[in-house]
Amino acid sequence: MEFQMTKHQVARTARPDAETYDKIHLLKSTLTLRATYQIRLLLFRAVQEGRKLVLNVQKDCVIHDDLKTLMKEHRKSIELVRR
């Protein structure tokens, strides 16, 4: 994976909680979930590698409109699982 530097020369990347050959898993425990930099970066990676980003959230988690829009744009590459 290639690192990109910010103007202050800080490497920017995100790490998933788990990975399989076809999925990248991210576990989130929050009341509201937005399309954060972490989610967008892992989604970009999933698309590039032909995998699916799986967001594991609590049953009562509210999905913000910006994340709903992102999920609609990338239906085949992102999945929401409520636990």
Image (tube, rainbow, N blue to C red):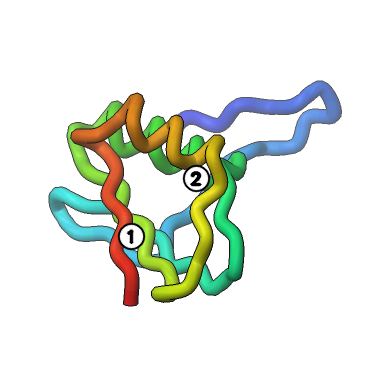
Amino acid type, residue under disc 2 in the picture:
Ile
Q: Position of residue 32 (x, y in %)?
A: 60, 60
For the C terminus, the quadrant is bottom left
Label 2 and label 1: CA atoms lie apart by 10 Å
Answer left or right for 72 relative to 2: left
Q: Secondary structure at mark 2?
A: helix
Q: Is residue 1 visible?
A: no
Q: Quadrant of residue 42?
A: top left
Q: Is residue 72 above or below residue 35?
A: above
> Mark 2 sits on what residue?
39
Residue displayed at 37% across by 66% down: 56
Name the N-terminal-most of marks 2 and 1.
1
Q: Position of residue 22 (x, y in %)?
A: 15, 49
Answer left or right for 38 relative to 57: right
Residue displayed at 20% across by 41% down: 51
Residue displayed at 37% across by 37% down: 71
Q: Secondary structure at mark 1?
A: strand
Amino acid type, residue under disc 1 in the picture:
His
Q: Quadrant of residue 9?
A: top right
Answer left or right for 71 relative to 20: right
Q: Position of residue 66 (x, y in %)?
A: 55, 36
> Mark 1 sits on what residue?
25
For the N terminus, the quadrant is top left
Residue displayed at 19% across by 59% down: 20
Q: Residue furthest left?
A: 21
